[in-house]
Image (cartoon, rainbow, N blue to C red):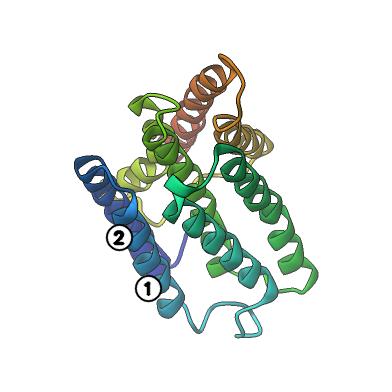
């Protein structure tokens, strides 16, 4: 499961800039640095892969929908302080539903591409990360939940530092189920349920550690 050099270098850059700006968010007690970094990084991805968006060389409806999901995510977190928790949860649900539709559109219109795969995948990762950070800034859960959002970027950084940046996690039903559970759990955090948000967040962290740990073993040892 190799990836092209352009995507390799961008994913490493993206992971590093997300990790660094997350630290600045905590230092400044503001979420804006991460939003700004995400806008810059995704804009760079779109520019660098402008000849690889789809097999037809246009942007594609699936990628356009992914872009709308990303825009909704960034706007939701930008106006975090002004939004009630239930609207944040609703935005998360729309983003999650859109994740199924954009892939379906790309397949139906024969627009599948490596760019589309990573645009979608990194939008998903940013969604989980920003919702975790938002929950911390809303004082809904402790700072430990940022690990849920950071694990994807730490995994990419591991691949880069170990000289395996041309590899990626394997696709599996188990991985997909874990992603759906984690995506739902970051929505549940914003709902007025006692105890449940803490329980699902803790389980999400454990499941992600298992999932990425399994991928590291597979990449490192073929197990």
Pointer 2 residue: 13
Q: Which mark is residue 153?
A: none
What residue appears at the point 52 percent right and 31 percent down from the top-left corner?
211
- Would you say residue 32 is visible in this rendering? yes
What is the secondary structure assignment of the residue under circle 1?
A: helix
Q: Position of residue 144 (x, y in %)?
A: 35, 25
**Relative to 162, residue 12 above or below:** below
State the CA–CA distance, disc 2 to disc 1.
10 Å
Classify residue 101 by image quadrant.
Answer: bottom right
**Relative to 180, residue 168 above or below:** below
111 left or right of 48 in image: right
What residue appears at the point 65 percent right and 48 percent down from the top-left corner?
96
Pointer 1 residue: 44
Q: Position of residue 131 (x, y in %)?
A: 48, 42
Question: Looking at this rendering, what residue extends furthest in the left direction?
Answer: 27
Crowding near pointer 1: few (<14 within 10 Å), some, many (20+)?
Answer: some
Dot 2 or dot 1, earlier in sequence: 2
16 left or right of 151 in image: left
Q: Position of residue 1 (x, y in %)?
A: 52, 54
State the residue in front, 176 or 186. Answer: 186
């Amino acid at each position: 499961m190799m990836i092209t050099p352009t995507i390799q270098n961008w994913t490493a850059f993206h992971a590093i800039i997300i990790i660094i700006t997350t630290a600045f968010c905590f230092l400044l007690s503001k979420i804006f640095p991460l939003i700004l970094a995400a806008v810059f990084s995704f804009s760079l991805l779109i520019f660098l892969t402008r000849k690889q968006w789809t097999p037809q060389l246009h942007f594609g409806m699936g990628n356009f929908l992914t872009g709308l999901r990303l825009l909704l995510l960034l706007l939701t977190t930008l106006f975090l302080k002004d939004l009630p928790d239930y609207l944040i949860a609703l935005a998360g649900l729309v983003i999650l539903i859109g994740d199924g539709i954009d892939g379906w559109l790309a397949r139906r219109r024969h627009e599948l591409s490596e760019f589309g795969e990573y645009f979608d995948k990194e939008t998903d990762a940013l969604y989980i990360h920003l919702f975790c950070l938002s929950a911390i800034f809303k004082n809904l859960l402790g700072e430990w939940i940022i690990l849920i959002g950071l694990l994807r970027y730490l995994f990419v950084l591991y691949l880069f530092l170990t000289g395996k940046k041309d590899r990626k996690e394997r696709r599996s039903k188990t991985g997909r189920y874990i992603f759906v559970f984690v995506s739902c759990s970051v929505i549940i955090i914003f709902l007025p349920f006692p105890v449940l948000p803490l329980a699902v967040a803790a389980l999400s962290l454990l499941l992600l550690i298992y999932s990425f740990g399994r991928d590291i073993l597979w990449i490192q040892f073929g197990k």
